[in-house]
Image (cartoon, rainbow, N blue to C red):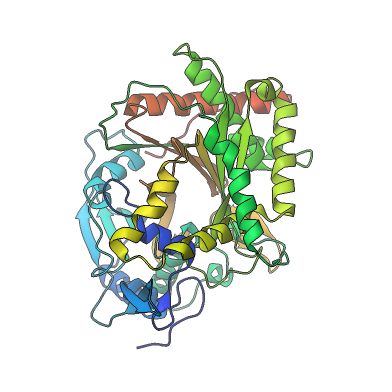
Amino acid sequence: MLKAQKGILGLMDHERLDIISDVMALTSYGNVKNVILVAAEAAGTFDKDAFTMAVSRASAKFPVLTSHLKEIREKGQYFLVREHSQELHVPILIRELSKSNPRAPTFDSLISHMIPLLDRDWNLFLEPPVEIHVLTMGKDHFVFGLLMHHSAGDAEAILALLKAVLGEYEALVSGEASPWLENPFASSTSKKKGSAERRFRWKDFLGQLWRDLPYRKVKPVLPCGTGNRQETREWHVKRVLSVQDSARILKCFSQDSLHVIDHLVACTNLALDNWNGKYDVKPGTITSAITVNMRGRFGGTSEKNYSSVILFRSDPDDRREYLKFVHELASSRIKQFEKGADLTTRKSFLRGSKLFYYLPLGLRRRVPRFFMMHQQYSAAVTFMGSLFPRFDGEGMGRDSSLTTFGDLEIIDIHAAAYKHVGGAAMHLVVFIYRNRLSLLLATWGKFMTEAECNGFMDVLVHEIDRATHLLTSATPAIKDHATP
């Protein structure tokens, strides 16, 4: 066996799970699945044997992919650890992806096809935490999908795995390594200016509980709809904007010391107001949870899940003037980062979890789930930046370097965070690939129907369009360019 590679997919013997991985493993039961799907849709000639060998090589370099969970007891406390097993192999499943409607977007057909696999109970104590699916869509048209349980890694980890597999495939087919492997980052949000990590004390933990109190006391506005309370399904919708519209939006959203995430949060808040207005529901308090990729900020290069959240709260008066609102969001974001709120939140999870290490698995898994499912947020927003960005050793551009592998050209990247634990009524994920913005929205069926989820996405795109009109004199309306 090859030596375990250090990094986000490396593995030490009986490695204890980091706090986020631990929570994701403990809460994965019932209707919470905590699964990440990333897929590359590509056209060209596919070599099945080379791909199988590429997966085998990548798995050997990243032994976390062929590990299972195990509970151990030390000094009266219970811990989850990863244990590598030579008997485990990353499964490769090759099937046909059929479309009921030839004009339907690939993303819709992909999610529909994957639902039985996403919804199953993943036994992490016996199975590897990763599956690879090759879906054929006719001659020379494929979707290469990776399913990873969130306990094994976050979005950056699964993107790194996809890049590693495609890199091995490229080397086998062409005989040489591809230059895009030189970029150590799978997404542009992973490269940040480092910050000093301050000491975390019990009073910081208590302070975090005090700051969270307003979010627990106030009932936030939730999206209206005709969903069924008994509905267990989760709807996923995707929009891909044109290169021209994406460039216009990114230019407008990156001006005046503002960041793209500030505008995405603001537009999501306004979209929720306008959507609920159709149901004669007055605006109220909106709470937003912003997921933060902490890699590079406090190190964390070897963490499987190195992320956290920062929180925002807005009342109707805050949202009356868009420019004032988005600047207040930016100011709050900057202040939270200056105070290390993302790190404090993560360490608060860790400090709080230590109180329950004396409980066995059956009891311990109910604690984080109870707290996370009962802290309700109006929406969660994630901005991943550019996927597989070009890298010159210092800076990264928005264009993607990984566009081909072997004799295949990547048409689009698809992704979904499926039934994750947490109290957000909806989750918006935004990334850039090949200079096009992709917006992915997930909502629970208990709030909305699938048609209403699509309708909300339309309202959100309209709000983004309206924001760019406010920020610039450009007038062309945004058009959806969903990949067929």
Quadrant in which the N terminus is drawn: bottom left
The residue lying furthest to the top in this view is 280
Q: Is residue 169 left or right of residue 280?
A: left
Residue 36 coordinates in the image, percent (x, y): 38, 54
Q: Is residue 270 left or right of residue 103?
A: right
Near-viewer residue (356 or 156)? 356
Give above or below for 357 relative to 224: below
Is residue 461 at all visible to an observer of this figure?
yes
Residue 287 coordinates in the image, percent (x, y): 56, 34
Is residue 35 at all visible to an observer of this figure?
no
- Where is residue 340, by image quadrant? bottom right
Near-viewer residue (192 or 206)? 206
Q: Is residue 312 left or right of residue 224?
A: right
Near-viewer residue (26 or 82)? 26
Give above or below for 287 relative to 299: above
Give above or below for 319 relative to 359: above
Residue sitting at x 30%, y 54% = 140
- Where is residue 326, by image quadrant? top right
Quadrant in which the C terminus is drawn: top left
Residue sitting at x 40%, y 84% = 13
Residue 117 coordinates in the image, percent (x, y): 24, 52
Q: Is residue 466 left or right of residue 87?
A: right
Give above or below for 233 relative to 453: below
Residue 480 coordinates in the image, percent (x, y): 48, 31
Q: Number of numbered discs present?
A: 0
The residue lying furthest to the right in this view is 256
